Image (spheres, rainbow, N blue to C red):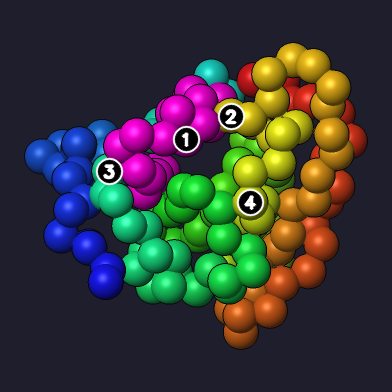
Amino acid sequence: MLVACLFVPQVLADSPATQPAMVVYKSPFCLCCKEWIKHLEQSGFTVASENGLDTAEIKQQKGVPQGMQGCHTGVWKGEYVFEGHVPARLIRKFLANPPKKGIGLAVPGMPEGSPGMYRGKDFKPYNVFLIMRDGEYRLYETVNAPEKS
């Protein structure tokens, strides 16, 4: 059962000019999601979060393929989706030149080396995927070193 009504916006009353560019849909109990948001904010992004116990509906609405899902979903100005622990620098790269028919980027699962998951030891490379409008996806970039905020 999807529980969309459990999402509680933290920022709704602001005017459009002051609303955050990125809204992150996440569990209220997830610490790595909070760390990813912190990574984005330290990288200059304005972020709000909406807490809910089931983020499946937003993933489906935004076209995130099942095999590309992570623990949280970031939505950029209602237009692009950034699923899981996508590094801020790759979000910037994507937004600077969105690939034709691309709807966003995904880091499936919770790779230990990704922002919000990396704890400073034994970095493990991971892949970032481009999500296409038709539900397909392809490799966007392999991250071979820890990200700096």
Q: Amino acid at mark 2?
A: Gly
Residue under label 3, please give it. Answer: 51
- Residue 119 in the figure: left or right of residue 74: right
| Region of the chain picked out in magenta, as a range | 20-41
| Residue occupying image coordinates x 80% and y 50% | 127
> In x, y percent, where is residue 131?
65, 68
Q: Between disc 3 and disc 2, whose residue precedes?
A: 3
Q: Nearer the viewer, mark 4 or mark 2?
A: 4
Q: Between disc 1 and disc 2, whose residue precedes?
A: 1
Residue under label 4, please give it. Answer: 109
Helix, strand or loop for disc 1:
helix
Q: Amino acid at mark 4?
A: Gly
Helix, strand or loop for disc 2:
loop
Q: Nearer the viewer, mark 3 or mark 4?
A: 4
| Residue occupying image coordinates x 74% and y 15% | 120
Q: CA distance from mark 1 to mark 2?
A: 7 Å
Query: Residue 33, labelled with which disc?
Result: 1
Q: CA distance from mark 3 to mark 4?
A: 19 Å
Residue 59 in which image quadrant: bottom left
Residue under label 2, please give it. Answer: 116
- Disc 3 vs disc 2: Cβ atoms closer than 8 Å? no
- Disc 4 vs disc 2: Cβ atoms closer than 8 Å? no
Q: Nearer the viewer, mark 1 or mark 4?
A: 4
> In x, y percent, where is residue 96?
65, 49
Q: Amino acid at mark 3?
A: Asn
Residue farthest to the right?
144
Q: Amino acid at mark 1?
A: Cys
- Residue 115 in the figure: left or right of residue 31: right
**Which one is nearer the viewer's eye here, 63 or 79?**
63
Q: CA distance from mark 3 to mark 2?
A: 17 Å
Q: CA distance from mark 4 to mark 2?
A: 12 Å
